[in-house]
């Protein structure tokens, strides 16, 4: 969009009017075209960068790539609210598989972030309200932003505290889909001035790499299919999510209007407080009572009305067509932010013959052969300049190009469609006026380009300043780190030296002790050898003495035997002396007979 200032404010406007076709005009036209091309190129590059960023924003691998990781998760975290952990199967995710992957084959499965399930206390299988939300939004469970799951959970807990059946129409009375894109998570935001729940966190973190596959276990299709075999919700990443802007109030029934009225009478409820009281009805009722803007009696009346119609409301919610209650923008998937950015930088251009002029807030179709009418702006008689080829080059294009400039006398030239239809004087005046408009366009484009350059330079200077500050911080942190590292290194070296010295001293002491022990051992060996030699001598002496004693003992025994025989001879003179002489001290008696002594076989 070209912003035109009033002529009175253009103090830098050149006083010299250059003739048509001069070098100055050609140079000005060239500079203008180059600047316009540069601006368009920057727009294209910016859009390409944003598209590339969006297309890769969900390409994050999961950490659950093995059965061991999944098994560890299942042992640590319970994800089934009905105690049926074995009724569904959790599979690991293959390397290079993302949440945007679509499976067209059996068995079907869906991705879900385990971190979201664990943190927000979501339970599988999803209840009917959650399935309805996913269906009307046409998104997979992993496609909904975690903070949006927070709103769903908080809404259901609040409805539970009021004994109200959660309904899609009631929910979208307070919320709307902020924006939709096939390449990013879908966010739900509060309707203006109707926020009823606080976010769990301003930025839900550490969840994008925690997705796994969930699929039906044997005999449990209820996880993903209804009784007729239809899908309860989209399983895979949807390329066409719905942009839901709210609910049509006239389509709500009496019960739903009562629920809206009840929820509208509460202050902003904390998700943390609600989830901590999910299984504590009394505590939940006390908290919601403290956050209500109505009296306890009025609140009790609302709860009683809700309870009396609860059964009928449950039947109605199960059979209701939620889409008929919602306001859905038909434009579908779009990137509003990028569209607005492009629109704010669009330049008004007129294409010859059949053309379409596009501005910030207006569109105008031109039919072939119909003269262009000058359009007045909100200034003092100035109009925006629309030329077929840009700048003052329209004067050289003959009858093909139409002029939508503002001459000094607009009434005189209001019905003139080309320069060739004007008289010579008027042609000269129109040429001058056209040149003035071309110069104005060039000036304003240059001025705008200069402002953009200044703004860009300011941003660059700000970035350079920030970068310089970061560099200084980095240098300071690096120097401090190096100093700390040197100090730690020196301290460690001192400790190592002390330990090494202590070990060396210990080794020296051990070596000295070893020498001492070796000397003592040598002495003990010498002493033991001496004792051994003395013992050997003592053994020899004792052996000789024993032998001597044995000889002496034998001799004394023999002499005593002989003496005994002599005594026998004296005592019994009648005994046969010859028989007595045959007796010997070494004979032995065997079976009553005296026989010579025989050595035993062992001897």
Image (cartoon, helix red, strand yellow):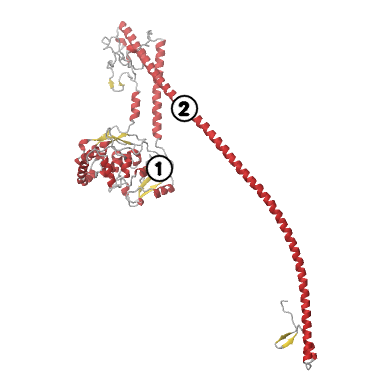
Q: For residue 420, what is the image quadrant?
A: top left
Front in this rendered view, residue 138 or 560: 560
Label 1 SS:
loop
Q: Which mark is residue 469?
A: 2
Q: Which mark is residue 349?
A: none
Image coordinates of residue 110 in percent, x first then y, are 35, 44
Residue lying at the far bottom of the rendered structure? 574
Image coordinates of residue 170 in percent, x first then y, are 25, 39
Q: Quadrant of the N terminus?
A: top left
Image coordinates of residue 243 in percent, x first then y, are 29, 34
Picture layout, residue 31 above or below residue 279: above
Front in this rendered view, residue 309 or 526: 526
Relative to 100, 578 lies left or right: right
Q: Disc 2 vs disc 1: Cβ atoms closer than 8 Å?
A: no
Relative to 317, 118 lies left or right: right
Q: Which mark is residue 210?
A: 1
Q: Quadrant of the C terminus?
A: bottom right
Picture layout, residue 576 above or below residue 443: below
Q: CA distance from mark 2 to mark 1?
A: 36 Å
Q: For residue 242, what is the image quadrant?
A: top left
Question: Does the rendering let one see residue 261?
Answer: yes
């Amino acid at each position: 969009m070209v912003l035109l200032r009033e002529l009175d404010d253009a103090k830098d406007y050149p006083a010299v009017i250059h003739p048509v076709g001069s070098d100055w005009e050609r140079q000005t036209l060239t500079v203008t075209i180059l600047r316009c091309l540069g601006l368009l190129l920057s727009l294209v590059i910016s859009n390409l960068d944003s598209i590339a960023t969006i297309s890769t924003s969900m390409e994050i691998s999961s950490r659950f790539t093995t059965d061991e990781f999944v098994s560890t998760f299942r042992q640590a975290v319970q994800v089934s609210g009905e105690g049926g952990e074995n009724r569904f199967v959790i599979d690991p995710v293959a390397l290079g598989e993302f949440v945007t992957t679509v499976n067209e084959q059996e068995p079907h499965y869906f991705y879900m972030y385990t971190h979201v399930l664990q943190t927000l206390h979501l339970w599988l299988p999803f209840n009917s309200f959650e399935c309805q939300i996913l269906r009307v939004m046409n998104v997979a469970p992993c496609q909904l932003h975690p903070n949006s799951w927070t709103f769903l959970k908080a809404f259901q807990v609040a409805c539970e505290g009021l004994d109200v059946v959660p309904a899609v129409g009631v929910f979208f009375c307070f919320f709307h889909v902020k924006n939709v894109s096939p390449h990013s998570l879908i966010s739900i935001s509060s309707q203006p001035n109707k926020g009823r729940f606080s976010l769990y966190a301003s930025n839900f973190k550490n969840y994008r790499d925690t997705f796994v596959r969930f699929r039906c276990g044997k005999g449990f299709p209820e996880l993903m299919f209804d009784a007729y075999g239809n899908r309860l919700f989209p399983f895979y990443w949807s390329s066409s999510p719905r942009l839901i802007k709210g609910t049509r109030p006239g389509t709500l029934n009496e019960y739903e209007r009562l629920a809206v009225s009840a929820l509208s009478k509460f202050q902003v409820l904390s998700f943390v407080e609600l989830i901590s009281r999910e299984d504590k009805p009394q505590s939940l009722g006390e908290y919601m009572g403290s956050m209500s803007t109505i009296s306890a009696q009025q609140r009790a009346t609302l709860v009683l009305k809700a309870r009396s119609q609860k059964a009928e409301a449950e039947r109605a919610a199960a059979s209701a067509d939620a889409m008929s209650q919602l306001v859905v923008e038909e434009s579908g998937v779009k990137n509003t932010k990028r569209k607005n950015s492009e629109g704010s930088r669009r330049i008004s251009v007129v294409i010859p013959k059949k053309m379409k002029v596009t501005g910030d807030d207006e569109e105008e179709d031109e039919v072939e052969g119909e003269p262009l009418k000058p359009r007045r702006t909100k200034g003092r008689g100035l109009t925006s300049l629309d030329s077929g080829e840009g700048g003052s080059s329209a004067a050289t294009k003959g009858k093909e190009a139409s002029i939508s400039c503002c001459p000094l006398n607009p009434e005189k030239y209001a019905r003139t469609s080309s320069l060739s239809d004007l008289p010579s004087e008027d042609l000269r005046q129109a040429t001058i006026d056209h040149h003035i408009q071309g110069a104005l366009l060039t000036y304003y484009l240059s001025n705008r380009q200069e402002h953009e350059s200044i703004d860009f330079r300011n941003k660059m200077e700000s970035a350079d300043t920030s970068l310089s500050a970061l560099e200084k911080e980095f240098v300071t942190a690096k120097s401090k780190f190096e100093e700390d590292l040197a100090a730690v290194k020196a301290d460690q070296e001192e400790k190592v030296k002390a330990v090494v010295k202590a070990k060396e001293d210990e080794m020296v002491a051990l070596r000295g002790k070893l020498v001492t022990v070796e000397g003592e051992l040598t002495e003990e060996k010498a002493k033991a050898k001496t004792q051994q030699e003395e013992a050997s001598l003592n053994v020899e002496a004792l052996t000789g003495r024993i032998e001597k004693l044995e000889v002496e003992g034998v001799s004394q025994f023999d002499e005593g035997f002989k003496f005994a025989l002599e005594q026998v001879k004296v005592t019994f003179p009648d005994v046969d002396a010859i028989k007595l002489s045959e007796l010997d001290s070494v004979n032995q008696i065997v079976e009553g007979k005296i026989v010579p002594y025989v050595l035993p076989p062992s001897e």
